[in-house]
Image (cartoon, rainbow, N blue to C red):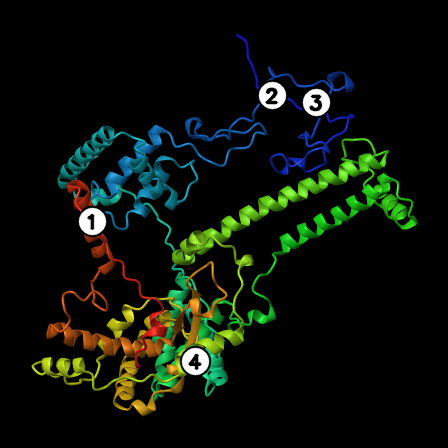
Amino acid sequence: MRMETNSLCLGPLPGDRQGTSGADAGRDSMRDVGGRVLRRRAPVIQSATAQPQPQASQITTRAPPAEGAALDHQPALTQAGRPRQRMKWTVSINESILRFYYKVTNLGQETIGYRQQLYAEFCREYPDIQVSEQRVSDQYRVIVRNNLIPETRRNTIKSEVEREINNQGLVLDQVPNEILDEQIPEIPIPETQPENTQQENNELRESLENEMARAVQEFNGTNPLSTPPLPRINSCKKLGALLQIVNTEVLPNYVVEAHSLEYLHMLIYCAATAIANVMGVKIRTRRGTNNGRTGNRTAPWEKRLLGKIELLRRDIGRVTEYVRGVTSRKVIKRAEEIMRSTARHSRYDPENNTAQQCLDTLKQKLSVYSGRLRRYKVSNNRKCDNALFENSEKAFYRKLNSTVESVDKSYPSQEEIHEFWGNQLSTPAAFNNNAGWIEDTTHNCHHYVTANYEPFTTEEVSNVIKELHNWKSPGPDGVQNFWLKKFWSIHECLSTLINHVISNPQEIPSFLTQGTTYLIPKDQNNTQDPSKYRPITCLPTLYKLVTSCVTRRIYQHCALNNIIEPQQKGCAKGSMGCKEQLIIDSVISNQAFTKKGTFLLLLLTIKRPLIQYRMNG
């Protein structure tokens, strides 16, 4: 029998030279001056060394398995004699796991709290296999999901276990309990300690109380619009434990003193700051400044590679001038220093004897670093896209749809933006209060029952808070809806204060009506015109909560009296006007196509409604 092995043919470089070390970092990362792909290592001549080379027919001996271990369950060994990391689950082990699962779960009917019993049965049958409790329970799901054991065989095993359970029940009915207690030994199952012990909870509570007291002392009486923005915190068990402690033991001590929305807002901010500090989350100083740094920063690895590429290009230019015969003393001195620093092409090659060989080495190094920079950029862009998709799918798809690069865009100056939008938003508009349609609408609404104002209950406020998005962009105060949701201990006080400001509008805090306006370009190809932007204003979350409560009451009144017309698609819950229009258009288009009739389409375009039509309030 003839054995054939595939081997990689490695040829020498031109002039018995090797490629630069590290050339195998990427595909086609090393080339010579002519553009040909260089290979790293030449084949070793058998006659050049006195040591005998191992033949393909030689078999490396492996270390014997450990004594006492089951041979059929022993993992395979590497050539060095070490066991492999992954274990091979045989068919017999998988069938045993199925038997144990059906046995401890009563044929799959009791699937709560069975993992410890399943792990105990597995350890009793296979004491030499060292796996975790989680891995054993996961293996059952792998068997079912990947169909490692056919369904017919699984049903057979289930029937066998069912007969064993029935037979065991008949035997147990006939044997006295005293004999059973003597014959059936108890299997000790290690008790798992809870993750958050009482001592850890006490430490967390003490840390939260200290951070809360420090935050209240620091931010009490300050302008809510000048405080640092709260960071976004990912959900975890520690965060849940901290929220529970804050709601039950920390915030109730401060809420009793909250007599205004501004003070309650300060307590919410301080509690969120305390949680962030205990979890070790960094809080930025202030939005927009980026700690004095510009928006587009260069990564350290990119700076490092760009620096090396710049040095290599500089050295290549100097050596090129030296090869051309420039007789400048400075050029000759620098070129000789460069040739001494690159005296060897690689550790496998002889020293460079000429300036041309040194230039070849520098160009290959430049090719290596340039290729590495390209690969790193592709990898970094992929990571950034994955992170952007995880955090905001809308922003990710918006980035995919954008066809114009940001470097080619020109934006209006701050003075142009203030001049245009300042005139649009600050100039009062004149309205005709004696219009005929106003009188007609007033006359048609006489038969509607007037809604009497009733104070908002805590349940109503909590239901409105539940519908808010957790991490929606906050206002200038930097408090997200997440904290309003999770701090449920303040909902009763919050509903009381909302009723107070609705009854006394003059006591509404001034910061609630201040927001941050962002200008989103409508046309990506024309970003210089300030009128081609869509203003989006982010208001504080407390203001949006108050308006949402009022809006819900108004909508309930409109729905109760059937005020909203069926044709009204905007501002109506459950309305999908865009989808309905698309369905209507598709139906009409298909009918016109099948019947070959005349199809007329009227397109109405409303441009810049915020400029041509103004609304009061």
Residue at disc 2, secondary structure:
loop
> Label 1, label 4: how many angstroms apart (C-alpha)?
44 Å
Tell me the mark number nearer the camera, choosing from 1 and 2.
Answer: 1
- Where residue 468 sits, quadrant-wise, is bottom left
When the figure is inspected, residue 519 is found, relative to residue 146, above or below; the finding is below
Tell me the mark number nearer the camera, choosing from 1 and 4.
Answer: 1
Residue neighbourhood size for the residue with mark 4, other residues' Cα within 10 Å, grouped as few (<14), some (14–19), many (≥20): few
When the figure is inspected, residue 394 is found, relative to residue 247, above or below; the finding is above
Q: Earlier in the sequence, mark 2 or mark 4?
A: 2
> Label 3, label 1: how many angstroms apart (C-alpha)?
75 Å
Return the residue at label 1: 599
**Residues under numbered marks 1 and 4 in contact, where contact means CB atoms less than 8 Å apart:** no
Residue 59 visible: yes
At horizontal 67% and vertical 50% (from top left) the residue drawn is: 305
Front position in the image: 149 or 499: 499
Return the residue at label 2: 7
Looking at the rendered structure, the kind of residue marked 4 is Asn
Return the residue at label 4: 423
Q: Earlier in the sequence, mark 2 or mark 3?
A: 2
